[in-house]
Image: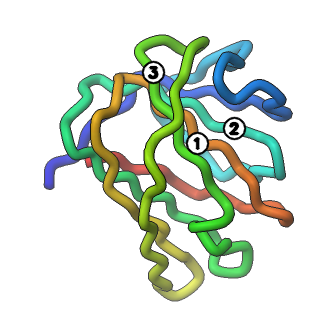
Amino acid sequence: MSEVAYTSWGLIPYDDDVLAAGPTSTHPPMIGNLSLDRHSSLVFQLAAAPDPLGVRLVTTAFSAPDPERAFQLFTGSTMDEYRPLEKTVWQLKYDGPFAHCSTKIQEVGTVIKLHCTSASSIVITSVHFS
């Protein structure tokens, strides 16, 4: 599958309203290493919204979560209004010091919100859409 670009991303350090809270600032489409804590969210503005959309998160192997319990996905057409996506099936694969958490989602808008529900922090090294 070909890569789908995201035009910006934002972090919500404590997301207490996952259906309406948006990031206070956005960043260019180059995400560096960052730690996601419980109740935080990453929000991505996509250039396009293919159906289905592949999502792959790369984390450090040490902080790799059980993605089924660590993440909730939401979508929308703006960064301040979301709807939950159906329960997704995640795959977790290790590659040396990294872990790849991937899933496919359907009926998405151009905004994707990844909400962290993990009890421990997760170090994200990159995010890819296809």
Position of 96 with respect to 22 (left or right) is left
**Residue at left 72%, top 80%?**
62
For this rendering, which residue is in front, 121 or 109? 109
**Considering only vertical position in the picture, is 13 above or below 27?**
below
* Residue 61 location (% of width, % of height): 63, 79
Nearer the observer, disc 3 or disc 1?
A: 3
The dot on residue 76 is 3
Give the Cα separation between the discs numbered 3 and 2. 14 Å
**Residue at left 66%, top 52%?**
33
Which residue lies under the disc numbered 2? 41
Label 1 secondary element: strand
Identify the image quadrant of the N terminus.
bottom left
Q: Are marks 1 and 2 in contact (CB under 8 Å)?
A: yes
**Total numbered labels:** 3
Which residue lies under the disc numbered 1? 114
Disc 1 marks a residue whose amino acid type is Leu
